[in-house]
Amino acid sequence: MAGHWRAMLARLATQATDDPATLADHVARQAADLGLAFRLTGDEQERAWPLGPVPLLIGAAEWSHIERGLTQRAQLLERVVADIYSTQSLVREGKLPASVVTGSPHYWRVMTDTPPPNSHFLHFYAADIGRGPNGEWRVLSDRVRTPVGVGYALENRLALSRATGDLLSAMNTRRLAPFFAELRRGLAADCARSDPRIGLLTPGRFNQSYAEQAHLARYLGLLLVEGDDLIVSDGRLFVRTIQGLKRVDGLWRWMDSRFLDPLAFDGGSRIGVADLYDACARGGLMVSNWPGAGVIESRAFGAFLPQLARAMLGSDLILPNIATWWCGQPRERDHVRARLDQLVVGSAFDQPVAGLPDAQFLPGASLDGVQRTALLDAMARRPMDYVGQEIVKLSTTPAVIDGRLAPLPFTLRVFVARDGSGQWRAMPGAFARLAGHGDIRAALMGRGDMSADMCVIDGKPVPPDSLLGGRAPAIRRIGGMLPAKAADNLFWLGRYIERAEMTLRLIRAIAGGSIEADLGPSLASPTMTRLVALLAQWGAVPGSGAAVGPLCATALGDSRQPGSVRALMGVVANIGEGLRDRLASDFWRLVRLPFPRFDGAVTETLLEASSRMIDRISALAGLAAENMGRGDGWRFHDMGRRMERAINGCRLISLFGGDQASDDDLTVLLDLMDSQISYRTRYLTGPALPPVRDLLALEPFNPRAIAWQAARLAEHIAVLPTLRADGMPEEPRRHADALVARLAPLTGDMLTMADIADAESRLLGLSDAIGQRYFLQVHKTESADILA
């Protein structure tokens, strides 16, 4: 492997022009473009993903040893979990202390004698492994509750491939895609239907690895769902969609068992699904991994796995644990007490315990006299709560630190999954975690940690993936299901984007954005007063009275004002996070662009900042217009924009297009509704009230007119799914058609302010009707129409 390392580093050095910082920046940009991000505990905002530019290389022979060890270990853990929740022969025969099982917070007695489909308790298994200075690999921990890291491993590979061109293929790097294809087939194989509907159950967008979960759901074609999206009826699991309730055949869960069902597990859970246990018990639902499987994650199990392997598999572990002593046994407890300075002491069941404040592990040698006494006293009172483990000495890998190559100790999180035939298959790669200032034993990334791609290098070229000989899926020309919550988010995403654009147009009008040769309305004019009052009404500024420059600066960039452009774009980003599995990476690139800097004066700088933000919002609209498939999701997003634009149009015409409107009022109104050029190409005279009203309210060919928005809303609603079997229109359809019919016979000289007020009232009623019919109503009685 030395030759591969030298060739790889030489290639990276050439690409970076001998400046490692350049390469690191390039890889970081690729990671950002892919939307890679994560959160530390307590973070409100996501952090950039710390991907290093230097991959870690492992040869095929060394990987083969790891692969065999992982497969053996997965088989062993499957058997142990199956025994714990069925015959419990390991405890009855004295091979496993009962307190090692019952002491775990992840043991759930309710799951006893509740077998999973095909008796597969585990579909997915991950292990943290480390390589010692002598080259021997050891397992640091087993992970079956949530497979955190597998999505990041995939994204690391994608980002590194983009940044380094053909480097990885030139080194004969094994591909990851076949593993994920088999993972998808393995999940489907245990579902009751041949073409199952599988959801990825997420705790929500504030979870530390939500970005990873959304990426995996999109990559694998799974439905990203939260607990509120799901409901159990008659022992079957369903997802709430705009088409009614649709059956779900399987769940890949990314939350702990305790949160899954508040009726069966932890009653305090607010993110689970009531009666999910009932769906499991009746045998109609595949859940990966089976609830309660996390019992084997406790560190106390590490002390017994070697002997369990000999008893259940008839062989020693190929990948040994780090040496572990559970203090619930007298001899082991005395061993830990006697060698405290040479060991690390930790909680046996990953719970806070006395003597280890704010730390899961502490080296015994780091304790002062008072701490040592407190720990030994605590161990004497409840010895079963503690384990001792050998101190981990890890080998290092090169990383770019402050623009220079430096060695960092690393661990690998490796993954195995059941394939379509039920056999275990290891992913030929890993999520490499490089220790910064965090705890290398922790489950998630810590502050200062880095990640890297791990590549398995073959001795011969890796053949390209081929679908020849495989069963091709049936051709479809329909979009996937749209959950009610996703429809809600898409609708409001459109509304907030449109609201931000209109606020920017108000700012530009105040700052002098008229196309007239002069500077537009004077600062003291009634038109300007109304513009400023509207900004205050929308929450963009605290009130009137300020000079134009500071006023516009506040409306543009003060996040403390809920209606400012910065605050509105923050809401856009937050809503977008909940749609991460449905939005392209280009969306995130636009939303995450730095907010424009400006000096706050009524100068070209402020106008340019507003114009740049309008350009950015126009680009978001362009992405939706050109890239989104014309399915139900696109329709809800477009309905959101049409709804907000129509409501704003009504309010602007009421404010600036009344019977006593001045030339300044009508000029500003045409500017705000982006119809100045359309008006001037049609009418040679200056602004006049009837033609302005007609163009902005009733013109069926003006994409800014109220009537145009109403027609598009009616078109969208007409093709959305209906739950009625009698052919009668649903409430949103009636509202939309009535609005179009109300506006159709009018002309500009007939239109009154009462008509505008009526149109706004109808739009608000239509918005409510859309929400009641299509969006998630958690406390609403479910429809009796349950569709397969």
Image (cartoon, grey):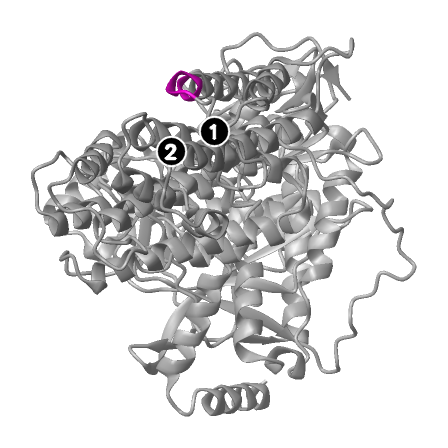
Circle 1: element type: loop
* Badge 2 element: helix
Residue 96 in sight in this render: no
Where does the image place residue 693, in percent across and percent down from the top left?
A: 43, 32
Sequence-wise first label, 1 or 2: 2
Residue 476: which quarter of the image?
top right
As for residue 498 lying within the magenta part, the answer is no
- Whole-percent x, y for residue 116 in the image: 71, 28
Q: Main secondary structure of the magenta part?
A: helix
Residue 478 is labelled as: none
Q: Quadrant of residue 103?
A: top left
Instruction: Check contact, mark 1 vs mark 2: CB within 8 A.
Output: yes
Q: Looking at the picture, which amino acid does disc 2 mark?
A: Leu
Residue 684 screen position, x and y as percent = 43, 50
Magenta region, residue range: 752-757
Residue tagged 1 = 748
In the image, what residue occupies the spot 32% across and 39% down?
A: 666
Amino acid carrying label 1: it is Gly
Please name the residue that numbered disc 2 is placed on: 689
- Left or right, 275 with respect to 407, comes to right
Q: Nearer the viewer, residue 530 or 383?
A: 530
Instruction: Give the answer, above or below, for where 80 lies relative to 55.
Output: above
Seen from the viewer's position, the closer of residues 367 and 759 is 759
Between 551 and 106, which is closer to the camera in this rendering? 551
Location of residue 253 with respect to 34 vertically, above or below: above
Tell me the distance, in whole angstroms, between the alpha carbons under discs 1 and 2: 8 Å
Q: Residue at x 50, y 92 (%)?
A: 10
Mark 1 nearby-residue class (10 Å; few <14, some 14–19, many ≥20):
some
- Residue name at image x 68 percent, y 75 percent: 61
